[in-house]
Structure formats: C-alpha cells, structure tokens
Amino acid sequence: MKLLEMVRAHKSGTPVGIAAVCSAHPLVLRAAIAKAAQDGTPVLIEATSNQVDQFGGYTGMKPADFRDLCLTIAAEEGLPRDLLILGGDHLGPNRWQKEPAEQAMAKALDLVAAYVAAGYEKIHLDCSMACADDTTPLSDEVVAERAARMLAVAEKTASDAGLAHRPVYVIGTEVPVPGGAHEELSDLEATSPDAARATVAAHRRAFEAHGVLDAWDRVIALVVQPAVEFDHLRVIQYDRSRTEELRHALDDEPTMLFEAHSTDYQLPERLRELVGDHWFVIKVGPGLTFNLREGLFALSHIEDELVPAERRSDLRSVVESTMVADPDRWSSYYEGDEDAQRIQRRYSYSDRLRYYLPDAAVEAAQERLLDNLSAITIPLPLISQYLPVQYDRVMSGELSSDPRALVMDRVTDALRPYAYACNLQEVGA
C-alpha cells in the first residue's frame, strides 16, 4: 500500500509527506486530481464526517457516493486508480455530540463501517469530542477505548468485505477544530512530547484490550498540534524551534509519524519544514475553497464588465443573500457589527462560505457565471486585472483562458506549496 511505503521511506530518511485534500467540492476535487495526474504522484482525498456520513452529511453524499464521484473525476482526468487514495477524516461521534455517548458511538461505529466497506484506505479515528453525558475533559483512556471499538469494527468490516488491503489508521486526541479556530487566536502551544507519548500508550493498551493490536503497525500517524492554526484574519506560521522535542516523540514507533491539521495558508517553506520534521500528513481544506471563492469572485467581476445586467449570474449577491437568509452555518463563528460580519462571511480564512457552495441557488449562479464567460472571449487585460497569476500562465501558453480552467488553476495555487513540501517524486511515488 502506497501510504505504508511512503511512511517506511520517511522513516528511512527520505523527507516525504502527503497532502490530505479535505474538500467535497467537485471543482476542488478536479483540480487536485488533475494536478496529481500531471505530476504522476498519488493524491489523498479525505471526506470529513461533517461532509459525508451514512445519512448523507451536509453534502448529501454517503461514503460510496463520494468514492464514486472521486473515481469518476479520476477517470476523466487520466489518474490511474492506484494513485487515488481515499480517507475518512474525524470519524467518530463528532456529528452526534449532543446525544448520549453510547447512542453517539453506535452511530460512529456504523459510520466507520460505511467508510471501510466503501474502500476508504485511510481512517482517522477521532473520539476526542465529548458527548452529552460525558464528564469533561475526556481522558486519554476514554478516547482510546472508543477509538479501539471503532477500529475493531473497521477491521471486521474489511475482513468481511474481503478487501485486498486493510486500512491504515490515524489516532490522536489533540485535534484542532475542523475548519479552523472559532475565535481570534493569540498564541498556540505545541503538544508536549509527554502528552504525545501518553496518547500513543493509551491507544496501544486499548487496542490490546480489544484484541486488535495486530493492526498497530498500520497506525501510520498521530495527530498532534505543531502550533499552526488560522482564524478569520490571522495565520500562525510554523516555527520549528517550538517542536524540537516533540518531533522525536515517535522515534521508537517504526511505522508512525505525525499528522498536522489546519495547515492551510502556511508559507511553502514552513510546509516543507513541517514535512521534514516528521509531519507526514499535512491537511488542507478551507484554503482550497478560499481560493475557489477568490477565483469565482474574480470571474464575477469580469462578468460585470462584459455581460449585460439582465443576463449576469450575480454570483456575489446570490452568495450573500443565501448566507444571510440561512445564518446557522456562520453566525456562531463571525462576530462584530454588520460590516464586520459581512467581510467575514465573504473573506474569512475559515471560509464558512464553503458550506453554502452546494446550495441550489449558489450552484445555479456559479454555472451561469461559467457558461456566460465560456460563450465569449475574455479580454486578456481583464484576466490581468482580476487573476494576475493566471494571466502570466495564459500569456506563457501554460493555461487556457477558459473560465473553468482559470478557476481550477486558482484552486491549484493552494495545492502547489503542498507539492513542493511533500517531495513525492523523490520516492518515485
């Protein structure tokens, strides 16, 4: 299995890593898969328990549906099947925290079974969140015991399905909030080495107690906090001087490295340092749809210049009115007066706007925008004005001026630093 091969290469001294693309938007998925096909490298696509679950998640897709979407795009983009790796992120009681623990865990067990049965190869066992009747904070032992229950179900599901390869797993309790911090950040502390070792030890004991210790050599990563994060307006960049001891906490684990969440918006050199310091998986999610929104908004400004008012998509206005009419998915995150909230709705690093992209009205406006601009030739000076990086590529012949190509390339701009950081071509992956 490619991920295990890559972990072994990293442990042997080759600083290889992999980006986990955490998005369900078709344009983002296509951009990531097309880049992997062009580079001849694997791509790891992860669905989160918020996006995709056994009931459909907020995307309306179950694990098999999301798998089929990715496989279809991979076939269309010419990516070999063995280079597409699917993962499940934050699998656990996350979606059902308001329910009693046993009720939530019953759904979590069904969730992991659905992912494994659909052929997902990388499973993040995340039981770090407290349920309605839990005493907080949860101990390592409680979290590990729940993770072991999920792993046992995952292993049985894989066996019953006759899968050629058993899944690989990620464990860890020090998990940032999915999608970035809720509040403004001041500073962060990296996970202590002792806390990391305690988490590993608790999981090992729990796996043994549940009779699944034979899966231990397929636990490829531990989620810890390397002191990187972003909020609405600020990004905390990686400072490797703060992880000098932590990065050696797994030296005695022959198949385990680190996984970093919320690495969106890190500078390319900081991402490269993270991988070199043994963060094998570096996750990117909101940063991808942030760039998608930038590309779409840029095209909507071009549309304003070229298309009569009665035929325009009015994408920006449609997004705004949709978010204002249905504030449940952003109102608890964005504070301040009306102007401050308006800016955050549109431009925040945490990009809660992404939750509204599947909305029927927003999707229709997006398609109208792209269709409008596909029917005409976009003058090059307008591409220079609103998408200057893409303009340079159009002028050099690297990129088409088709609006879909322009917006996909803007998404790819968020992926290029990860390709630089992960050194995938060094191991012939």
Image (cartoon, rainbow, N blue to C red):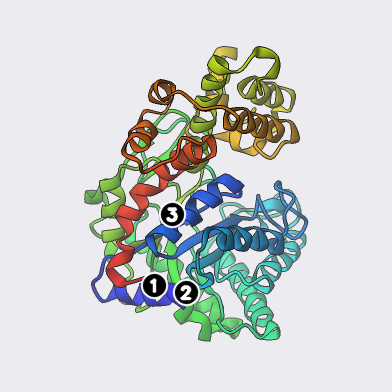
Whole-percent x, y for residue 355 in the image: 64, 38
Q: Is residue 37 above or below residue 22?
A: below
Residue 336 visible at all:
no
**In the rendered view, does 12 fall on the left or right side of 143?**
left
- The mark found on residue 256 in the picture is 1
Please tell me whether residue 37 is drawn above or below residue 209 in the rendered image: above
Q: Closer to the camera: disc 1 or disc 3?
A: 3
**Vertical arrangement, residue 242 with respect to residue 371, above or below:** below
Tag of residue 219: 2
Name the front one of labels 2 and 3: 3
Q: Label 1's element? A: loop
Disc 3: which residue: 35
- Mark 1 to mark 3 CA distance (whole Å): 27 Å
Residue 42: horizontal and vertical position, in percent?
44, 65
Badge 2 density bin: few <14, some 14–19, many ≥20, Cα 10 Å: many
Distance (Cα) linking label 2 and label 1: 6 Å
Q: Position of residue 198 (x, y in %)?
A: 42, 67
Looking at the picture, tell me which residue is in the foreground, 411 or 177: 411
